[in-house]
Amino acid sequence: MLSSAQLIEFANNNGIPLWALNASIALVMAIVVFAICGLGVIVFVYMERKVSADFQLRWGPMHVGWHGTLQLIADALKLFSKEDVFPRNADPWVFRLAPIFMFLPAFISLMVMPIGPGIVIQDLNVGLLYILAITSISVAGIVMAGFGSYNKFAVIGSLRSAAQMVSYEVPRALSIIGVVMIAGSGKLSSIVGAQHIWYAILQPIGFVVFFVSSLAETNRAPFDLPETEAELVNGYYNEYSGMRFMFFLFAEYIALMSASALTVVLFLGGWHGPGPEFLGPIWFLVKLFAVIYVIMWIRWTLPRFRIDQVMDLGWKVLLPLALLNIFITGIIMLVI
Amino acid sequence: MDLIKMSRVKEQRVSKKTPIKQDLDKLEQSLELELPETDKEIDSLRTEELIVNFGPQHPSTHGVLRAVFTLDGEIVRKIEPHIGYLHRCFEKIAEKRTYAQFVPFTDRMDYISAVLNNWAYSLTVEKLAGIKVPERAEYIRVIIGELQRIAAHLFSLGTMGVEAGALTPFLYFIDEREKILWLFERVCGARLTYNYINIGGVRADVPEGWLEDALSFVHHLKKSIIDYDKLLIGNYIFKKRMVDTGKFSAVEALDWGLTGPPLRSTGVAYDVRRSDPYSVYPRMDFDVVVRYNGDNYDRVIIRSEEIKQSIRIVEQAIEQIPDGPIMAEGVSRELVPPIGDAYGHVESARGDLGYYIISDGTPKPYRVKIHGPSFGNLQALPAMAKDSYIADAILTIGTLDTVFGEVDR
């Protein structure tokens, strides 16, 4: 929680105004979450490279550090030190702001994730709504990147992603309603608290719809149409290089982390697990990595859909399934 | 496009030849006046066709194809392939080299299946000079040629997966191809451009134990190709992407001059190994794989099935191979064929690969004309991929499996 009684008392005794206390706590928290994000991204990219290597009869990074563990730090340093290439006809502001617009939503959606019992930065009453609202902003970042960089491939990629994300927003939101109906709350910590049986078991349809649309939301395979390297040469971030490119990569993996964390919180029992309560965060992490592994497994196995097939799947399959899920949940709750 | 149309409409309005036309114009003008503001705004919004340059440096153009796509949203209205970025004047160079000197140049044409190019050229020169190739050399040519076909088809299947977004199968296919390249390396020391099949036979006999290793490799591939089929070709998404896209009928395919897998996918059983047999293929028992739908999926499946047929041929050839010389007697490096011309063709991994050579009785050919199957297959692309999605057009380029060393020569 942001302001506990002791802290307020401490502030009063030392003459620190309340707004300064709140601001400093928010700043500290933001830095902590940013550090966690940075670490998480390094771990996930390393994991992705190792998992993909394992799938593809390769070793992956092996030379920098033990089993290539320092490879990503070297890569990050390289990207930092690269020249900032700015396309001649690009829109200066839109082009520069796009990576931030991509990065921020995924980043601040982590603020409401309950990692363990009581371990959460800001436990909002409308946490679920907040996440749904925030994560849909990132599409603005993609569209900005596409239009700002004055590149035809980027425009096509960003249009694709706009269509895709708007379509999958709907089934994703609807698939959560079943969970909210059972838990009786939109607060993420109380959803986990009420989850003695995993909602993936109670809500199998909702879980599948949510998982598939999360893949589409985060532009992961088989829905990575906006960045298809075979057709659009990396789509919307075609013109980005160096640090800005790294920001896109950063944003992508944080979005992956946030979507997986939300899956764990809503459907896989959050911090619940055998053993004493203080093991909660560890169980959360184990589940998080399991979900991310499955997502990577899917990415490195399946081909990708075509744009019209993606739309068909979203509107004609997932949306009716999500509605059916709400209907069934409602009837069962009436009966019981 | 739209601008041109609009200007034409304007011209018609100015001419005003018939009274009906005048009335219509008046009616239109009056209607335009009555339009509310918002509708006018919508009318003034232009939809424009986007012209995008795919290539020559594009990850999925298999080399240096520059294709100009005219896009209407996600749909490709028109494709113009531009070729010539890899042109190296091989046909002209051939006129300045002796017959034996030109063999290494043929490697650089279809560099994914180089040995088959060696073979087609050597076959034609042998026809021209009336050289009889020893039996053992013919069998080695068949074994090497079929292994090369397997390697080329594996590569093609792998890149197809990459174009459809599946990156992992590519590595599996490349791994198997690598084993074939090792086998080739042991035979001739090279991995990509072999210069192995020469006029009159092959350059060197296979090393000891090589035939057994080749046999054990094809046995291994026979088992693993079933898994790969399940992984890539049997995949639901892959099927959904491929079936009924880039469709071509048999008549169209023959009109456009397609050969190889793209032709056989439309139901025409044309395979040079059967239609105009050469070497020891008449003694081999294998099927010409034919599919009837003519879409991208059939073109992919044919390649996978042909790998299985090639495995059968390699097995039989290794069983039947006799001992003996590997080079025809009396073939010198200063080969002077009699005056005349000859056409020889083989079934390469892409299709019907032909060489037409005219000799004027000197050590150098008067003219060498090469018919590359990729060139014929590529020219059907605009017709095949018209009005399809961008993603499908890219897949169609992939399933035609053109190699640009051969298109441009």
Image: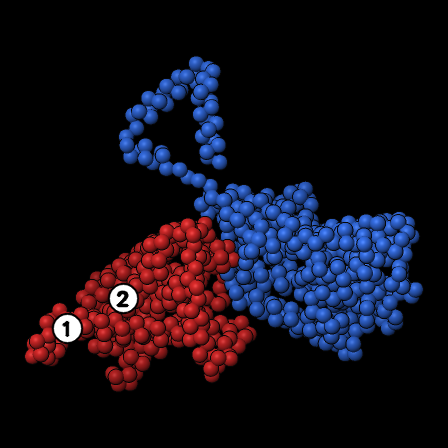
- Residue carrying label 2: A108
Q: Is residue A232 above or below residue B1?
A: below
Residue A233 at x, y percent in the picture: 49, 57
Dot 2: few (<14), some (14–19), or many (≥20) neighbours within 10 Å? some
Judging by colour alone, the chain drawn in red in this rendered image is A
Q: Closer to the N terminus: mark 2 or mark 1?
A: 1
Q: CA distance from mark 2 to mark 1?
A: 20 Å
Q: As shown in the figure, which amino acid type bears the numbered disc 2?
A: Ile
- Residue carrying label 1: A21
**Residue at position x 23%, y 77% in the image:** A119
Q: Identify the element where label 2 is drawn.
A: helix
Report whether B63 appears left or right of A161: right
| Residue ranking furthest to the top | B19
Tag 2 and tag 1 share a subunit = yes
- The chain carrying label 1 is A
Residue A151 at x, y percent in the picture: 44, 51
Residue B348 seen in the figure: yes
Give the total of numbered labels: 2
In what quadrant of the picture does the C terminus of chain A appear? bottom left
**Display colour for chain B:** blue
Report whether A282 appears left or right of B21: left
Closer to the camera in the image, A133 or B309: A133
**Residue at position x 44%, y 21% in the image:** B13
Closer to the camera in the image, A242 or B390: A242
Residue B313 seen in the figure: no
Closer to the camera in the image, B203 or B152: B203
- The chain carrying label 2 is A
Residue A268 at x, y percent in the picture: 32, 72
Residue B310 at x, y percent in the picture: 71, 64
Tag on residue B371?
none
Figure quadrant of residue B204: bottom right
Dot 1: few (<14), some (14–19), or many (≥20) neighbours within 10 Å? some
